[in-house]
Amino acid sequence: MKKVNIETSFTVFENIQELPQDVQILMEKAITVRKNAYAPYSKFRVGAALMLDNNQIVVGSNQENAAYPSGLCAERVTIFQAGSIYPEAKILKLAISAASDVNLTKSPIPPCGACRQSISEYEFKQNTPIEIYFMGEEGSIYKSDSIKNLLPLTFDKNFL
Ligand code: THU
């Protein structure tokens, strides 16, 4: 028997101004589109913006449904939209901003497990890492250099 340790790492930025210029723009777009979330049930709004290697930016927000599981997270709305419009483009960077209508979220809010799995599918598809930046309504921003930091033991097509 042996114990296996997996290391994961993140970069922490104190505020939006500390981000590289192009990521600041991306995060501002995530914040803006977050306000378009359709979140009457959870009152929790998430916005996402991604940059492609063809310089296009694609945005999305969470869309809920009275039949709860029929709704979709902002990250998947966004990456599926990008895959639909630009199937050949690679995703370089993804910025995520989350805020509750009822509480002030000051800590970085990471993508949920299902979104991590979906992001990971695109990293495999394009064979290059996706930078992921996530934050709450205010406060610091976490950066992951790849989905692998957020989902280390990934289920992928090689297992099929
Ligand atoms: N949500 C996202 O959009 N992204 C996540 O990664 C976590 C959760 C949404 C789904 C639902 O509309 C609301 O936040 C509360 O879970």
Image (cartoon, grey):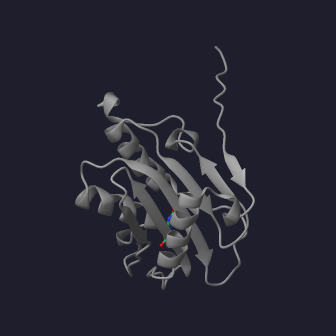
Q: Nearer the viewer, residue 141 or 64?
A: 141
Please state which of residues 132 and 92 is positioned toward the viewer in this rendering: 92
Total marks shown come to 0
User: Which residue is the extreme one toward the top?
Assistant: 1
Residue at screen point 44% across, 59% down: 50
Q: Of residues 52 and 66, which is closer to you in this image?
A: 52
Q: Horizontally, is 7 left or right of 62 in the view?
A: right
Q: Position of residue 105 (x, y in %)?
A: 69, 72
* Residue 58 higher or lower than 90, as above or below: below
Q: Nearer the viewer, residue 151 or 13?
A: 13
Residue 1: image x %, image y %? Answer: 64, 14
Going 36% across and 38% down the picture, which residue do you hit? 124
Q: What is the x, y in percent for residue 138?
A: 70, 71
* Residue name at image x 65 percent, y 73 percent: 137
Q: Residue furthest front?
A: 21
Is 58 situated left or right of 149 in this image? left
Q: Please identify the quadrant where the C terminus is shown.
A: top left
| Residue drawn where x is 71% and y is 51% of the image | 12
Query: Residue 8's quadrant in the figure?
Result: top right
Determine whether 50 is above or below 39 in the image: above
Q: Residue 75's x, y, as percent? A: 44, 61
Displayed quadrant of residue 103: bottom right
